[in-house]
Image (cartoon, grey):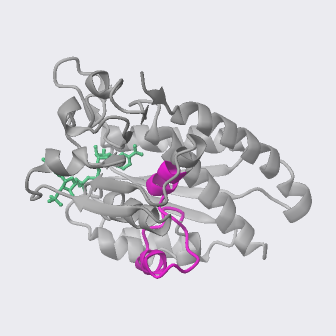
Amino acid sequence: MSKIISGKELSAELKAAMAARVAEFPAKYGRVPHLAVILVGDNPASVSYVTGKAKAAAEVGIRNTTIRRPADISEEELLGLIAELNADDEVDGILVQLPLPKHIDEDKVIAAIDIRKDVDGFHPLNVAALWQKQPCTLPCTPKGIMKMLERAGVAVAGKKAVVIGRSNIVGLPVAKLLLDANATVTIAHSRTADLPAVTREADILVVAIGRPKFVTADMVGDGAVVIDVGVNRDPETGKLCGDVDFAAVEGKASVITPVPGGVGPMTITCLMENTVECFLAKMGE
Ligand code: NAP
């Protein structure tokens, strides 16, 4: 049987510790951190993510303002809203829930966020800093994955890590963090030849592709550590499932993360941590 890393339990612990810290902020700094979340349109997945973020902020004691705008908001209006939040001294973190409607240039919107308030770590200067090993705000999902590995006692240095997926928000940054932790990293993608042969070599396998139960037992080496980032609907049951066929892979892996209750909660917890860090940086800490 695999050891299951519960992102839900680790998140609960980290949030409780953060809440105790944040409770001291009003006396020390005069207020608590403030996260502004912009939700454009009413995509159900986005609404659910934004609700989860608001709930986590309440648990930690962070002030959360969710700003809802219709799907037909113009790019100019959205950029104007970001400029207002950038200028607002009482806003410490700005998050624009992605994806945005097609008529809006996401890159332009992300680049418009004041880098000091970029709690998602998606701003091009934060990305550049990550790749140059400079201090930066780390993107939440990769940060959460590294915390899970640490919590499970997985020694990363010297290990063969395979990341399936090369997106800007998960695949590439988690590969960089694993590299910085001295793993030997392979990044696989949709054009990788003989993917199962590549993934079977992995001591640590991170899967971020967005295909339900794509990774089957024959793709996993005995005793591998398997981190499942995927959030999908199982076409058969309609329930949430990951990119890994959990039932088949559990037992072969030494360590595995579940979906739901794995990487997802850690992403939100790291968002709270990033908000606290941006707040403290502003307070000169
Ligand atoms: P994405 O931008 O769509 O990227 C998917 C990546 O998977 C691409 O690099 C793609 O390769 C690769 N891929 C697709 N099909 C493949 C195949 N058959 N074989 C090998 N590689 C394949 O997705 P993303 O934003 O990284 O998200 C990935 C998954 O993680 C989604 O389910 C998403 O919902 C989930 N997610 C979860 C969290 C969380 O907190 N739990 C956070 C973010 C994302 P190419 O580059 O060659 O096209």
In the rendered image, the vertical position of residue 28 relative to residue 285, given as above or below:
above
Q: Does the magenta stretch include residue 130?
A: yes
Residue segment shown in magenta: 119-146
Q: Which residue is drawn at 22% across and 26% down?
A: 234
The percent position of residue 73, horizontal first and vertical second, equals 31, 61
Residue 117, quarter of picture? bottom right
Residue 161, percent across and down?
A: 35, 55
Number of numbered labels in the structure image:
0
- Assign the N terminus to one quadrant of the image: top left
| Front in this rendered view, residue 223 or 37 | 223
Q: In this orientation, which residue lies closer to the viewer: 152 or 262? A: 152
Residue 92's spot in the image, x, y percent? 64, 66
Residue that appears at 26% across and 49% down: 201
Q: Is residue 283 magenta?
A: no
On screen, residue 82 versus residue 192, left or right, reads right
Q: In this view, does 133 lie above or below 161?
A: below
Q: Which of the 4 image quadrants contains residue 34?
A: bottom right
> Is 155 situated above or below 265?
below
- The quadrant in which the C terminus is found is bottom right
Q: Is residue 153 left or right of residue 69?
A: right
Q: Which residue is drawn at 25% across and 55% down?
A: 165
Residue 83 visible in rendering: yes
- State the residue lying farthest toward the top: 237
Q: Position of residue 78 (x, y in %)?
A: 39, 68
83 left or right of 245 in image: right
Q: In which quarter of the image is residue 213?
A: top left
Any part of residue 67 in sight: no
Residue at 20% from the left image edge and 39% from the top image edge? 219
